[in-house]
Amino acid sequence: MEKLQRQSKFIRIIGQIAFWLAIVAGITAIFALWLAPSSDLDINIDNVKFKIDQLLPWHRLLITGIVIMVIGVVGYGVRHFYKLFKLYEQGEIFGEDNVRHFAAIGKAMMMWFLVRVLINLSMIALAEYAEMQLNFNLSISSLIIGIAIILISKVMDEGRKIREEQELTI
């Protein structure tokens, strides 16, 4: 158990660092989009390059929305990920909070699929300003993985309830 707790602490710390790096990267991208000198600055979204000086204000708002959605979903998922590992670090393996965080990670995966759909739709609106041809590849793997994680969390919750009932009958 001690080894699991040490490993969980390490993974939790990595998760916390990733969480804050994602937020800083998102804020930096938004500031660069709106405040950077736009002469030769390019922005790259989903491997599509845009020249900032060619973007209209509503394009910048759309890109800002994309960045906020991405950071929101990634932040939500990573936050629940590191909170789950904090519980593991504390020795809590099959508690109610574990199930809740695990299910939230599944929801984040499903939200990621929706964000990818919205990014693709946004790229259509920005296509005339792109420096390359748009090529969309929408994989449903994050949706399937999200559903699977949520189902696993329900199985974990049932197991937790059975364990609690057994502890009460003893």
Image (spheres, rainbow, N blue to C red):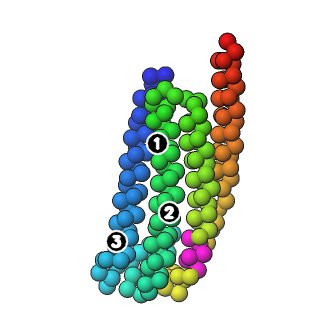
The correct choice, above or below, for 92 with respect to 150 in the image is above
Residue underneath mark 1: 82
Left or right, 60 with respect to 24, comes to right
> What range of the chain is rendered magenta?
119-124
Residue appearing at x 29%, y 81% in the figure: 37
| Numbered tag placed on residue 31 in the rendering | 3
Overall secondary structure of the magenta section: helix
Q: Nearer the viewer, residue 78 or 43?
A: 78
| Numbered tag placed on residue 70 in the rendering | 2
Residue 153, position as x, y percentages in the image = 65, 40
- Determine the secondary structure under disc 1: helix
Residue appearing at x 44%, y 86% in the figure: 56
Q: Quadrant of the C terminus?
A: top right
> Amino acid type of disc 2?
Val
> Amino acid type of disc 1?
Tyr
> Amino acid type of disc 3?
Phe
Does the stretch in magenta take in 120?
Answer: yes
Are circles 2 and 1 on residues that touch, CB within 8 Å?
no
Does the stretch in magenta take in 115?
Answer: no
Pointer 3 or 1: first along the chain: 3
